[in-house]
Image (cartoon, rainbow, N blue to C red):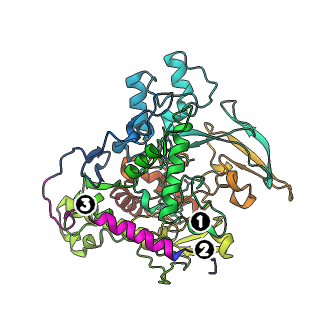
Amino acid sequence: MSVQYSVSVRGAWRRVLAVAGSLAIVGAASAQQVSTQPRAGALVTPDPSGLLQTSTPTGSIDKGNPFFQSLGSNGRTCNSCHRQAEGWTVTAAGIKRRFDATRGLDPIFALVDGADSPLADVSTFAAREKAYSMLITRGVIRVGLPMPANAEFTLTAVDDPYGYASAAQLSLFRRPLPATNLIWDTAVMWDGRETFAPFEPPMDAGVDAEDLRSSLQSQALDAVLGHEQAASPPSDDVLQQIVDFESNLFTAQLFDKSAGALNEFGGMGGAHILAQQKFWIGINDSLGNDPTTDPFDPDVMRLFDAWDNPDSAMNRDARVQARAAIARGQQLFDSLPIAISGVAGLNDVTGQPVIQGTCGTCHDSPNIGNHSVGAPLNIGIADGSRRTPDLPLYTLTNNSTGESIQTTDPGVAMLTGKWADIGKFKGPNLRGLAARAPYFHNGFAPTLLDVVNFYDTRFDIGMTAQQKSDLVAFLSAL
Ligand code: HEC
Ligand code: HEC
């Protein structure tokens, strides 16, 4: 495999230092054996499978930060779409509750990008229920992007159920990404469009710590001007306070309803342990581009090694059984063979029509699960074949070959104009998943079982029901 991501080792080491800096903040929670259920409080919030934990340097969430202040004209704050209890994004269920509680008048329900079309009628409750249907049912925001200049393709047909999208502005329905665990981002936004060093060779490697800060600052500025509809930009000082706040958040599942505390009996769940995770750009890269030149270790996830206890089969304690299921799920994530084919960004780039891999081939950052290089991939979520009637469908025609494809979101191609980049998105961070359904860039999968079923079908894996439920138990414990 010969892909060259010219990885900046200097940048990589700066990032290691940034992570080491966060060590000071984590306290000694790691090896403790807590026997009672932790109580929900400032840093621990309930979610559908147990409790989610966020760790901060001060031990509290600074609600005075401009992240929680309205900086524009429509009453929204960053917190309108990035909520602690919803994994620092928003869930479809949480939005539905907010819609009902405020009769659709909470500031998140704004025409600009909360509605299916910015021209929708929102004059009555019933009208609003219809106008904000995508936000309520899928938890998605309408990202409006123009067709790129000088693209290798032309938009030849638009089928938008909401009658708004055109070449001037494609409506791309996308999930807010979690505003936490950001220090490990190798790309900012689903399509990397806020990455300081965008997805262009030779910067495919991702961003170093300094670039990441500039990327997040630019992202925050655009969020204030766009989502919050500010007439003028906030000061650099305000933006830096926001970046300081969000890039010091660490979030992970802490307690599982079936398995109990995820940091007991040698388990390494929870946000405190996560905050100590070592990382550098290209760490454990599955294509052999780790700057340390260490080979890819398929044991990407090592959080629940201690629970992989064969004796547990004899043990009738329900919690022991549930912990064993999580450990089996981790084992599947690290080793269940997947014949990866037809993935643009991987098979075409390596010239290998089939790569014998695992979940960890693409989610290769140890114990974090994002892609440790910025390289975006097309696993087919936006393919026309997976279009549901509520999504706009775009037909793109290649200017030189005349070939046409249909997609619900061209992804990275909206930035680069490249045919080969259609449908590519970043491999997101996998921690704190249980709190933030639905999944994938457009909320395609309502539950983690739907995620697993997608992979089972997409790569023809042939998982058993037991394997699926073990994998779901593991993903829910992240
Ligand atoms: C109306 C909802 C909304 C508001 C308000 C909002 N965001 Fe977001 N945020 C999103 C969406 C949607 C995305 C993903 C868009 C994409 O990738 O195309 C996102 C992505 C992000 C990301 C990228 C994370 C990553 O890992 O790539 C960060 C960071 C972020 N938002 C921070 C903020 C900050 C800071 C504010 C306030 C200044 C803010 N957001 C306000 C909806 C919102
Ligand atoms: C070929 C590369 C590849 C493989 C193999 C792969 N993933 Fe992914 N994964 C991705 C990409 C890329 C995305 C984002 C796709 C999108 O939203 O369009 C993703 C998204 C996800 C998400 C959604 C996260 C979120 O925040 O919405 C989960 C969960 C996930 N993968 C779990 C898994 C599991 C479990 C496996 C193994 C069964 C697996 N992945 C195998 C590349 C891969």
* Residue 159 position within the rendered picture, expressed as x and y whole percent measured from the top left: 72, 37
Q: Is residue 298 above or below residue 218?
A: below
Element carrying mark 3: loop
Residue 22 colored in magenta in the image: yes
The residue that disc 3 covers is 262
Give the CA distance from mark 2 to mark 1.
Answer: 9 Å
Quadrant (top left, top right, bottom left, bottom right) of the C terminus:
bottom left
Q: Is residue 372 above or below residue 156?
A: below
* Residue 342 position within the rendered picture, expressed as x and y whole percent measured from the top left: 66, 65
Between circles 2 and 1, the one closer to the viewer is 2
Quadrant (top left, top right, bottom left, bottom right) of the N terminus:
bottom right
Element carrying mark 2: loop
- Neighbour class for label 1 at 10 Å: few (<14), some, many (≥20)? many
Between circles 3 and 1, the one closer to the viewer is 1
Visible in this render: residue 270?
A: no
Kindly identify the residue that appears in the image at 78 percent across and 53 percent down.
Answer: 151
Amino acid carrying label 2: it is Tyr
The residue that disc 1 covers is 375
Amino acid carrying label 1: it is Ala
- Neighbour class for label 3 at 10 Å: few (<14), some, many (≥20)? many
Magenta-drawn segment: 10-36
Residue 163 colored in magenta in the image: no
The residue that disc 2 covers is 5
Amino acid carrying label 3: it is Leu
CB contact under 8 Å: marks 2 and 1: yes
- Neighbour class for label 2 at 10 Å: few (<14), some, many (≥20)? many
* Residue 110 position within the rendered picture, expressed as x and y whole percent measured from the top left: 53, 28
